[in-house]
Amino acid sequence: MIRRTILFDNQCGFALGENSRAPNPFVTWQFNEQDGHRDYFWGHYMNEPDKAERDLLNRAGDYQRRYHVQEVEQAPDKETYLYYSTQRPIDIGTYPNSYFNRPVHMDLYFARQQVTGEAFQAWGAITYAHPLTEREMQDYELRPSRNNLDIRRQMDAQAQVVGKWEDAHRVPDQKRLTWFYPDFGSYVVKEYITPDQLAVRVRSIERQEAARAHKEAKRQPPIAEQLKAAQREAQEHRAPDGPKKKAPDRGDR
C-alpha cells in the first residue's frame, strides 16, 4: 500500500509503501508518471517506518536539488474510512495503529448496538484517513462501513452483475436488490440492501453460473469422439477421387 508520495513538475517523484507481510515491510521507490500510470523502480527496503520516512525525504530532496524541479501541490484525500469493532469494546491493542495510518476519530458505545444500515452490531467505530488492508480487518475483526469509498465501488460493481441477472430471470420488483438508473445507464443497489445481502446474491449467481457451465461441459462428448466425428465429417465432404489414368503399355517399346 502506498502511504505517501512526492510528485515533481516533471512527472517524476518518490513514494513510500508498506507491506506488513514482507520481510522488510517499508520501501521507498522512485517513479515516473505518464497518463495517470506510474512506473516504480529503485526500491530501498527497510524495517522501520521512521527510517523509511527519512529516506523518502532525503531522496526527494536530493533529486530536487540535482534537477531543479518543483514539488507539485497534491490535493489531500478528503475521504475517510470508517470501521466497526464488532467483537469487543474499543481499547488499547484492539485496533490497527500503523505509523502511517493512525485513527483520526473514535466513537465508543456504552454497549454493543445495531449499526444503522448494516447487518451487524458493534461496540464502537474508528475512523481512518486511509483504508485498512484486508489483513488488518481480519486480525482485529473490524467491519467496514458501507459508505467507505472502496466498499461503495465494490457494491457498484456487484450491482451490475446482480442487476443483469435479475433482468434475465425476470425477478419481481419486490424481490430485487437493484434497480436500473437510466440517467447513468447502470444498476444501483436499493437503499435498504446491505453489503452482506448483495455479496450473498453475487456468490449465489456465481455458483449457478459455474453449475450451468459444468452441466454443459458434461453434455459434450469426449475429445476422442469429437476427433473421430470431425474426421468422418471431413471424409464425407471430401471431393470424390478422379478416374485413374491408364498406364501406357510398355510392351510396345
Image (cartoon, rainbow, N blue to C red):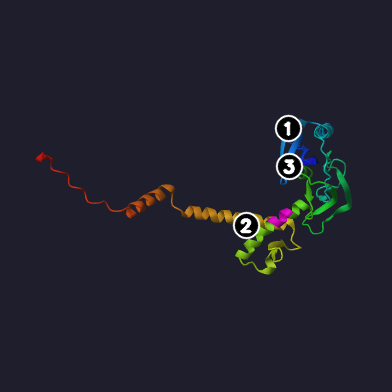
Q: Which mark is residue 105?
A: none
Q: Amino acid at mark 3?
A: Glu
Q: Label 3's element? A: strand
> Quarter of the image containing the C terminus?
top left
Q: CA distance from mark 1 to mark 2?
A: 44 Å
Q: Which is nearer the N-term, disc 3 or disc 1?
A: 3
Chain part drawn in magenta: 153-157
Cα separation between marks 3 and 2: 39 Å
Q: Verify CB contact (< 8 Å) between mark 3 and mark 1.
A: no
Quadrant of residue 193 in the image? bottom right
In the picture of the structure, the residue carrying the numbered disc 1 is: 42
Q: Position of residue 238 (x, y in %)?
A: 32, 53
**Closer to viewer: mark 1 or mark 2:** 1
Q: Quadrant location of residue 204?
A: bottom right
Amino acid at circle 2: Ile
Q: Residue at x 50, y 53 (%)?
A: 217
> What residue type is disc 1 on?
Trp
**Where is residue 59 shown, x and y percent of the image?**
81, 32
